[in-house]
Structures are given as C-alpha cells and as structure tokens.
Amino acid sequence: MSEIYYGTPVARAIRASLEERIAALRGEGREPKLAILRCGDEPGALSYERSALRSCEQAGIRVESIVLPWTAGTAELLRQVDRVNGDQSIHGVLVLRPLPRQIDTQQIFRRLRADKDVDGITVPSLARVFVGRGSGFGPCTAEACLAMLDHYGVPLSGSRVAIIGRSLIVGRPLSMMLCARDATVTLCHSKTRDLPSICRESDILIAAAGCAGLVDERFVHPGQILLDVGVSESFDGKLCGDVAFEAVSPLVRAISPVPRGVGTVTTAILARHVVEAAEELP
Ligand code: NAD
C-alpha cells in the first residue's frame, strides 16, 4: 500500500515554526499583515482567498481584503497597488488571479513592490528564484511542493524529477528550486512527446497541468513519489487533481491527494512569506 502525503501536517509544522517569530515581531510593535487584492467573485480566486484567510488567521497574521468590481480598470487597480505599496502597516500583498481581461496584468505586476510580493508574481521575485539573490519571494505553490518533499524526507540530491507544466507560478520556478537542490529535472509541457515514458523514468513526478486524470498507470512505477498540484472539477462537481488517483495510488511508493495535499501547504507558505517580509521591512 502506498503512503499518502497529506498537506495538513506540513502546513501545521510551517505555521508552528512562525509562532516565535510573530511573537518577536509583536514585541517590537510590528504586527505582520497581508493585503489581498481581488477583482470580482471568480470562484477560484474566492477559494484561494478563503484558504489564505484561514491560514493567516491560524498563524496569527492580520489580513485586509480589498475587493474591486469585475468591471474595474487598470488605473483603479493600480491606485490600490500604490496604496498597499506605501502602507507601512502592510508587509505582504497577494493579487488574486484571474484578473478581468480589460486589466493590463503586466502593468499591475510591474508596479507591485517586490519586497511585498509574497506570491512571486513580479520579475524581481522570479529573478531571485532563478539567480538565487535579490528581493522578493518564490511562488507559494512551487515552494509548497518543496516543503512537502522535505517534510516527508524525500531525498532530492541526485534524484530524477519530472514536472508536468511549465507555467511561471508552478513548473518553471519549481524546476529552478529543484536544480538548486541538486535534482535532475525534466520540465514537460503540452508539446512534450511521449510524456508517459519520460514521467515513468523519474523518481519523483510532479503534475501541475490542470488536466484532470492526465497521469494514469502508464506514467508510474512502484518506487515513485507523486505530487499532484493540479486542481480541476470532475464531471460530478468534485475537486480532483491531474492524477487518476484510484488507479495510480496503489502502484506508487507515495502520493499526495487532491484536495488535502499540496494546496493546503500553499497558504502556509504564504503566511511564512508575510512573516519574512515583516522581518525584512524596516
Ligand atoms: P497553466 O495553465 O498556466 O499551465 C499549465 C501547464 O501545463 C502548461 O505549461 C501546459 O503546457 C501544461 N499542460 C497542460 N495540459 C497538458 C497536457 N495534457 N500534457 C502536458 N502538459 C500539459 O496552469 P497553472 O497556473 O500552472 O496551474 C496548473 C494547475 O495547478 C491548475 O490545475 C491549477 O488550478 C493548479 N494550481 C494549484 C495550486 C495549489 O496550491 N494546489 C496553485 C496554483 C495552481
């Protein structure tokens, strides 16, 4: 029987590691605080916001939610970005996506201060992931994958890792983080030929495609560790991942489920970034 890598113990350990740091900040009169910027009521954004609110509340971090209508324009959102950039009581900023089509997303990302960019959307944050120095933070989901592997004691150095998905919020930064930990990484995407056999050759397979049930029996072997990052809705309205869990879980060494897997850890990393930002800001 394979081991199930749940996210809850990982998230709990991350939040526990913040307790003393938050107490020290409070002792200096600094209360860590996150601002969440959201446009409209898109279900994915609302779900991430709920999870972020819960995680920050459990950690003892204050949150201010700023909600604009779905009809908001770039100038309106930029005004809010300027406000949170300049507010010394706010240490971290989360801009929820998707943003409405009329908003120039790149302008928003360029305007956000990198040292408050706790979800790794700005160019300086990504540069920090790729170069290893500078300001900003890595994308929370990519760091959550590393936290899961570390918590469950999966060795990375020398391991062969296949990642499905090359987005800037998951696959690409994660590939750099794993390279920095001496893993050998293959970054796969929608144009990759013979995806199942490439994945089957890996020690660790991380699926972040957003394609329900993509990873089936052909992708795996008995010694493998699987992290499922994908979040989709199945035909019966339930949340599911990229891995065909029922078919695949008996065939591998360990697997993370969806829900209750990597997603649970993502917002604990977010809380940690807010604390780090509060420690670094004057
Ligand atoms: P995206 O659409 O930006 O990128 C998807 C990537 O997967 C692309 O590189 C694409 O080439 C690749 N891909 C898609 N279908 C494929 C296929 N059939 N074969 C091979 N590659 C394929 O998505 P994203 O923003 O990176 O998110 C990916 C998934 O992760 C989504 O389901 C999203 O909901 C989920 N997600 C989860 C968390 C979390 O905390 N658990 C956070 C962010 C995103």
Image (cartoon, helix red, strand yellow):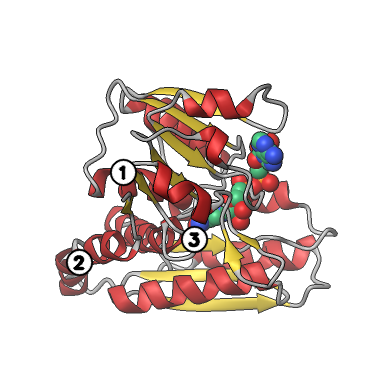
At a point 76% along the width and 77% down the height, the residue shown is: 69
- Residue 255: x and y, percent? 39, 49
Q: Amino acid at mark 2?
A: Ala
Q: Which residue is mark 3?
A: 258
Between marks 1 and 3 in the image, the one whose residue lies nearer the viewer: 3
Q: Are marks 3 and 2 in contact (CB under 8 Å)?
A: no
Provide the secondary structure element on which disc 1 rests.
Answer: helix
Residue drawn at (38%, 59%), measured in percent from left and top? 265
Q: How many numbered discs sit on the rendered protein? A: 3
Determine which of the numbered discs, if any, sits on residue 172 in the image.
none
Q: Position of residue 22 (x, y in %)?
A: 22, 68
Front residue of 280 and 266: 266
Horizontal side of residue 155 vs 126, given as left or right: left
Q: Nearer the viewer, residue 131 or 97?
A: 97
Q: Amino acid at mark 1?
A: Leu
Marked residue nearer the N-terminal end (1 or 3): 1
Q: Is residue 67 left or right of residue 203?
A: right
* Residue 165 shown left or right of residue 135 in the figure: right
Q: Secondary structure at mark 3?
A: loop
Q: Residue 78's spot in the image, x, y percent?
A: 69, 61
Residue 128 is at least partly visible in this image: no
Query: Does the beta carbon at disc 2 come under 8 Å from ligand 1?
Result: no
Q: How many neighbours does mark 1 have within 10 angstroms: few (below 14), some (14-19), or many (20 or more)?
A: some
3D distance between C-alphas at marks 3 and 2: 23 Å
Q: What's the amino acid at mark 3?
A: Val
Tag 1 residue: 149
**CB of mark 3 near ligand 1 (< 8 Å):** yes
Q: Residue at x 32, y 66 (%)?
A: 8
Residue 16 - label = 2
Mark 3 vs 2, N-terminal side: 2
Give the quarter of the image for residue 237.
bottom right
What SS does tag 2 mark? helix
